[in-house]
Image (cartoon, rainbow, N blue to C red):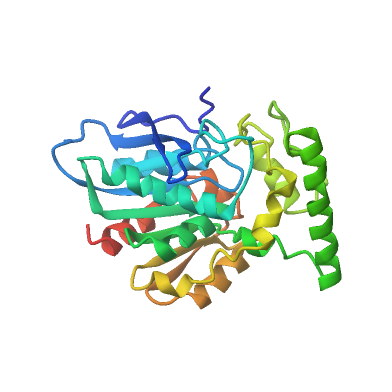
Amino acid sequence: MSHYIQKLSENVERKHVRYQNRYGIAIAGDLYTAKGMDQKKRYPALIVGAPYGGVKEQGPCVYANELAQRGFVVLTFDPCYMGESGGEPRRVSSPDLFTENFSAGVDYLGLQEFVDREKIGVIGICGSGGFALSAAQVDTRIKAVATASMYDMSAISRAFFNNSEELFKAKDALSRQRWVDAENGYPEYIPTFPEEPLDAAPEGMAEPDGEWFRFYAVKRGHHPNARGGFTTTSNLSFMNYDLLSHIDEIAPRPILFIVGDRAHSKSFSEKVYKEAATPKEIYTVEDAEHIDLYDRTDRIPFDKLEEFFKDGMRC
């Protein structure tokens, strides 16, 4: 199964790789390098994480395809329990495990003879932005972090409740769903997007739901392994976990927050930017909504990313 949303450049080689995270779960990845790269030399490396619920063949392949041409070794991956990676039952989400996915990538890259293990950075798109930052809080081997259209999934898990009573009811419903899952022998999963891509997103959908459909449900970004969301009870672990409670401890390593000027998610980056210690920067892309930073090469600021990582990791 391929379904890559962007054609591979003739100047880039892509190799499928597999490695384990610290829990022993097999992670499926793609390793991108410039064609003809001298493997006797050592190069800076980047890990690119997919949007929450996404896989490596979507946004990450767009970033990797371009950045490999700019002198980086780039690793993309399917989160554990997703896509071609291991983990049962499928589509389980966990803040700790999804953070660990980035550190597992650092483990793998640091063992490659052509990678400079002291120059490894990470890029997180959408929900992976929060996981990338979370990993960098504790994993000092990560030398620089960039996020694009960042979402903090732990904050989102509590964002839509007006008071403690509403929050308790949500927790109670999810807790009782665990009994249903236990009786059935498998966790409930309700996909958002169709198995096959639509010709166009449904009209009249409220935002941001309409925006998700404009990417995931149509040929632009559709992938059968990314049908939206996770098992219903996965949200409980995010309610009990603060992904970015130690954001100030990433310093003195630099952070770059990339946001679209029209992105509904812009406030997440602005909030975390205020809480982070220097060096840090917000870079605003004009005329860009949230999903434009997934795949639009005329909007994703690759020059800025190249400059940030080469300067931030002193390449």
Residue at 36%, 68% in the rendered image: 254
In the image, taking residue 258 as reference, residue 142 lies left or right, namely: left
Q: Quadrant of residue 168?
A: bottom right
Q: Is residue 65 above or below residue 288?
A: above
- Horizontal side of 311 relative to 240 (left or right) equals left
User: Residue 77: horizontal and vertical position, in percent?
Assistant: 46, 39
Q: Position of residue 233 (x, y in %)?
A: 73, 48
Residue at image coords 67%, 34%: 218
Q: Nearer the viewer, residue 72 or 247?
A: 247
Task: Farthest residue to the left: give it.
Answer: 40
Relative to 306, residue 198 above or below: above
Looking at the image, the residue that sits furthest to the top is 1
| Number of numbered labels in the structure image | 0
Residue at horizontal 60%, vertical 36%? 221
User: Residue shown at 50%/54% (left/top)?
Assistant: 99
Q: Is residue 193 visible?
A: yes
Where residue 29 sits: x, y (%)? 42, 35
- Of the 4 image quadrants, the one containing the C terminus is bottom left
Left or right, residue 42 beside residue 222: left
Q: Position of residue 81 (x, y in %)?
A: 57, 38
Asked if residue 300 shows in the view, the reply is no
Compared with residue 238, is residue 23 higher up or lower down, i.e. above or below? Answer: above
